[in-house]
Image: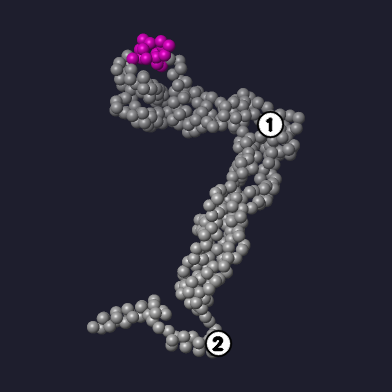
Amino acid sequence: MSKRDYYEVLGVQRNATEQDLKSAFRKSAMVHHPDKNPGDKDAEKKFKEIGEAYEVLKDPQKRSAYDQFGHAAFENGRGGQGGQSGFGPDFASSMSDIFDDLFGEFMGGRGGQRGRGQGRGSTRERGADIRYQMDIALAEAYTGKQAQIRVPTSVGCEKCAGSGAKPGTKPSTCPTCAGQGKVRASQGFFTIERVCPSCHGRGEFIEDPCTGCEGAGRVNKERTLQVSIPAGVEDGTRIRLAGEGEAGVRGGPTGDLYIFLAIKPHEFFQRDGADVFCRVPISMTTAALGGNIEVPTLDGTRVKMPVPAGAESGKQFRLKGKGMPVLRSKVQGDMYIQVEVETPKNLTRRQRELLEEFERESKAENNPASSGFFSRMKEFFEGKGA
């Protein structure tokens, strides 16, 4: 019986791209996989046919030979390596590699184990990362600080040196996987690797656990750590302390500690990046006549700032270099002082008399904004009446 065309087997056109081939193979293989069709010889045959087609078409050289000569390219030693057919005894092994690449953790194969290393002890569990929330004042963010924090975490057991085994003993090699942490199982014509069900990938087990940690290799403990907070940090800044998280299980790698900073609201200042804003109330006479006012700064000092005569409420004045430092640089932001003119309250009879006298002496040019507004309003209503 003649073989079906490989492109037909995968259900793609002859100009299909590499991605088209991979997608078609994945879809067909999922349908006819032996695990989904136990005991179905026809499904197993189709599954093998799909794998054979993809094995050829995914390789540019084999695909080129197939496009020229068809199935004859792999008969009588043509197209294979070392004078053998392209589907010799190594075919099942190559199919296992294909499925590792495509299905990874779904198949429980090597793709699900990557990044864990190979061989005994390669799957020791890494300790968890820890998140720590720290509140600091704006002044502390301005100057930076050295802080001491207490973190509840797990540390390596001193009694067993983190091994989990009773002192004087050591973990035994898992007999199921011979210390590899993974086992192989035959699925039709190829082999699949899975995490060892006996040792759960550790490659070893403990017969006589440590009484101090009950075999975990770690115990709960509160640690005191020193943290350096640089000047210029912003709200939400994350500081990473490598290796200061939870200890790994049975000597596994230690996790990291992440400190998230929250800057508390300040009584006077509002921050916007490197710039700082401060609202300062001034008297009506200072606004009208001008003068000097004292304003606070983040470094704890006070600065005299001149206010020009006729300053209006909402006017901003810039104090260069009095803002926040920019993190890890020599740049300094600015401070912006916004004046708010305060209307006098609780007037004495004499104060009222003086204000009334001032009002009688006032002219349009003394209050240009209000005079101009009411003048335009009068013209508006007169025009509307006409």
The local crowd at label 1, few if under 14, some if 14 to 19, many if 20 or more residues have their Cα within 10 Å, is some
x, y percent for residue 349: 54, 89
As helix, strand or loop, the secondary structure at mark 1 comes to loop
Q: Residue at x 41, y 12 (%)?
A: 84
Of discs 2 and 1, which sits in the foreground? 2
List the residue tagged with mark 2.
348
Give left or right: position of 140 versus 32: right
Q: Nearer the viewer, residue 223 or 27?
A: 223
Question: Which residue appears farthest toward the left when viewing the image?
Answer: 386
Q: Residue at x 48, y 71 (%)?
A: 308
Q: Main secondary structure of the magenta part?
A: loop
Q: Residue at x 40, y 31 (%)?
A: 26
Q: Which corner quadrant holds the N terminus?
A: top left
Give left or right: position of 25 versus 379: right
- State the scheme by which the image is colored: one colour
List the residue tagged with mark 1.
206
The magenta span reads 73-87
6 to 114, vertically: above or below: above
Can residue 73 be seen by looking at this rendering?
yes
Disc 2 and disc 1: Cα gap in Å? 90 Å
Q: Nearer the viewer, residue 130 or 142?
A: 142
Kind of residue indicated by mark 1? Ile
As helix, strand or loop, the secondary structure at mark 2 comes to loop
x, y percent for residue 109: 50, 29
